[in-house]
Image: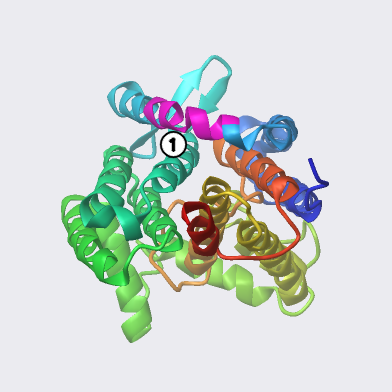
Amino acid sequence: MNRGDRWLLVLPLVLTTVGVVMVYSSSSILGLTRHGDPNYFLFKQLFRAALGVVAMLVCTRLRIRALEHVAPALMGIGAVMLAVVVAAGHMSNGATRWLKLGFLTLQPTDLARLAAVAFLAWWLRRHPPAESGFVRGVVVPLAIAGVLAGLILLQPNLSSAALVGITAFGMLYLAGASPRHLAIPVGAGVVGVVGALATHPYQMQRVRTFAGFLLHGQLDKQGAGWQLDQSLIAIGSGGWLGRGLGEGLQKYLFLPEAHTDFIYSIIAEELGFVGSTLLLILIALYLWRGLRATARARDPFAFLLAGGLTLQVGLYALVNLSVATGLVPTTGLPLPFVSYGGSALLVNLAAAGILYRVSADNGDQEALARQRWARTTS
């Protein structure tokens, strides 16, 4: 095995370290008031980060061919876990998204999205859309991904369900699916989102709040727009250099979920424009190295796997940052590697290890996967 791209390991570790520091800074007041311990969330995040680093190191030794063989089984396990969490999961804040396993709390959605990428790469490797036609090459993989998205939607978790679908579309495009073929399920997806909003009033309220803010500059600061208003206050008060690490004010129970969904707002408040921009640069560098590993992949499965994993991180980061800055309606998606949370951090670090392994198996010259497929079939 060649030496892999070390940036695919270094950058996630740096981002995770930043996340641990900022989780402590943003959650100490909440930990003190809710649990009587300012270090409550810090210690839990440190433990989860340690598990994630172990998972990342294990995945750097994982054989990509072995992962390809077990991809269908991983998809099945992910679907079963999602079904279990819908039927008997732990409810919090009106949603049933967690499974309690002793002292661990697991969110199967994160494991399922990783399994979905592996399965789609496995399927599209064997059924290239350009050769298999619309039904087998496009409809079938989207239908299977739709089953996972539907189970996630039942929790309910509209944002994660939507991103599973978008990831599937992205991988189909990478695999060479015709834009004309993709346009049909895109329309169906839009109808599905509208239906989900119509049947989930709290999600519809978020969309209405966002539309009022975007179109008319109106924000229900004492109601549905409270989080966004406090987030914008945090970002705006940071200035160029910020208030200083640990000196932010919005974490004093003004900004809900400051250590999870809105951790970027606290970073901007305490580290300012300079610190928050450096964070964005770190994320962008990771995405660039992931795309670089994708472009150099020797094998179609590795190409699609790396592309899907990189796309997922990029989508989660884009949506989280857009929520914090008021560009999209409020959702519950974490900022990869940085936000407080166990399952998401574990899966993202494991994905970084897989990307490193793909890069270690790559050649030195970049080439499109379609060109490689043409060579292997000629």
Q: Position of residue 354 (x, y in %)?
A: 65, 42
Q: Residue furthest front?
A: 378
Q: Quadrant of the N terminus?
A: top right
Q: Nearer the viewer, residue 242 or 315?
A: 315
Q: Nearer the viewer, residue 40 or 154?
A: 154
Side (left or right) of 154 relative to 56:
left
Question: Callout 1 environment at 10 Å: few (<14), some (14 to 19), or many (20+)?
Answer: many
Please, is residue 106 above or below residue 194 in the view? above
- Please, what secondary structure does the residue beneath circle 1 have? helix
Side (left or right) of 98 relative to 365:
left
Which residue corresponds to the image point at 32% horizontal and 56% vertical from the top-left? 131
* Amino acid type at image mark 1: Ala
Does the rendering let one see residue 254?
Answer: no
Side (left or right) of 322 relative to 294:
left
Q: Nearer the viewer, residue 223 or 172?
A: 172
Please, is residue 125 above or below residue 90 in the view? below
Q: Position of residue 138 (x, y in %)?
A: 28, 54
Magenta stretch bounds: 66-77
Does the magenta stretch mainly form a helix, a strand or a loop?
helix
Give the image quarter of residue 153: top left
- Residue 319 magenta: no
Please, is residue 320 above or below residue 300 in the view? below
Does the rendering let one see residue 360?
Answer: yes
